[in-house]
Amino acid sequence: MKFDELRLSKPLLDAVHASGYETPTPIQERVIPLVLKRKDVLACAQTGTGKTAAFALPILQRLAGDVAPSRKNGNRNRPRQNHARRIRSLILAPTRELAQQISDSFSTYGRNTNLKHTAVFGGVNKNPQTRTLRGGVDILVATPGRLLDHISDGTIALDTVEILVLDEADRMLDMGFLPDIRRILKHVPKSRQTLFLSATMPTPIRELANDILSSPVSVEVARVSSPAESVEHWAYHVEKASKRSLLSNLLNHIAYSRALVFTRTKHGADKVVRHLMRGKISAAAIHGNKSQNARTRALENFKSGKVGVLVATDIAARGLDVDGVSHVINFDLTDEPETYIHRIGRTGRAGASGVAMSFISSEEHDHLRGIQKLLGTKMQLASDIPGYKAPTEPVVIQGDERRSGGGGKGKSRRSNAAPKQAPYFPKKKGTRRPPKPGRNRSGAKKRTVQSATQ
Ligand code: AMP
């Protein structure tokens, strides 16, 4: 199917083509016509499927084509807002980064329309948001907490919302936002169109969906448990104390364009970053204890290629859309199999290939079992490879033997020095290599990471 068959208006099609998209993704094919027909939608879709455009494009089309409704009853207490523009679509997202990303998508897809949008989220000064809101917006993307602040300040009224979107609803639940969402819903008209997106559908999420959707059409584009098909899964047995050494060693020997590393704790993320920086591998951390400015800077630098490694906790990394993440590394394995799916959803996006590597200490074996069950396949264990020896002691890597990171897009680390320890990543005949980064790597013959064939 082509985008042109989706009955989108010319300004939107032009924006889509300018983004380089040729064909709609499966969720776009299914959801766009439903939204245009004003149906409520319950979509079970993982990130990386193109779900943002699936709701943003038809919302833009609907709002650009429709005349804003006049309010039936004048309300003197209504917040001071530009009367020409009222919030007609509200998109709720769990994290600041996701809210910003969705807002960026509206900028991209709505560039040829006159619709105005903005994002409001916590952790930054409220005043600039208030000023933008007073100027009037048609589409508002918000995280629940800051939205409620603005509502109680009287800077936002939601009584003209026609289309409500809940994105990543399961993560909202995990983050304890369900009471906030129920409070927000009281401010939104009952008669509206609602789009509900979630990667997984645990019972409380189904219950919420039942409460707020009216005769929804269910759309499921991939099994809840199915990871991006283009991702290879690798597991490394390594004791906790050796994980940091294994990580820096790996990063010095694999060709990665961008690597996203997940740790269990914020403190752990900082420790990993310090370790990598000591080894001259450019890295930044993103987690809830960082100021919003630091989070934004870390993400920007990762996106631009200034830092090659982003170390994140699950909450902060949720929903991040960064092109060209070649490797997701589970420094700490999650005990929630579905979180594994979310993590690896950062790579292999929109059809690109990717590699997921998991460091598994003896305490994490049970987690591995759960993940493999959900994946429906066994991860390739690095220790199963003939010749692989799990590290028993930290590997010393001399800083002057390696170039520092911090290069541009597609930069990979290289080492002119052989690893001090017997091969971590022995060569295995007949296996595929991880994807090549954007740039050549002169130490290529040293790269001996195995690739699972599944
Ligand atoms: P999302 O699931 O919305 O986070 O989107 C994942 C990525 O897919 C984003 O980088 C989008 O820019 C990209 N994308 C969305 N729709 C398409 C499409 N039809 N063709 C190619 N890439 C797309």
Image: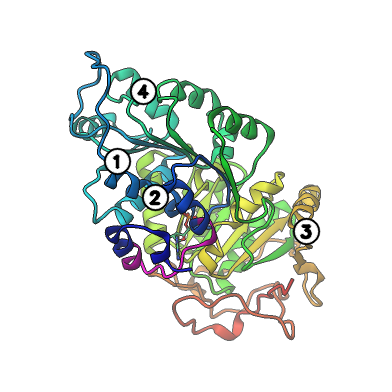
Mark 4 or 3 closer to N-term?
4
Mark 1 or 2 closer to N-term?
2
Give percent across and percent down for residue 201.
Answer: 65, 40
Residue under pointer 2: 58
Q: Is residue 344 above or below residue 182?
A: below
Give percent across and percent down for residue 133.
Answer: 24, 32
Circle 3 — which element?
loop
Residue under pointer 1: 118
Q: Residue at x 69, y 57 (%)?
A: 359
Residue under pointer 3: 376
- Look at discs 3 and 2 and give the one toward the viewer: 2
What is the distance, in whole Å, between disc 1 and disc 2 at their CAs? Answer: 18 Å
Mark 2 or 4 closer to N-term?
2
40 or 372: nearer the viewer: 40
What is the distance, in whole Å, between disc 2 and disc 4 at their CAs? Answer: 29 Å
Please indicate whether residue 431 sits to the left or right of residue 98 in the image: right
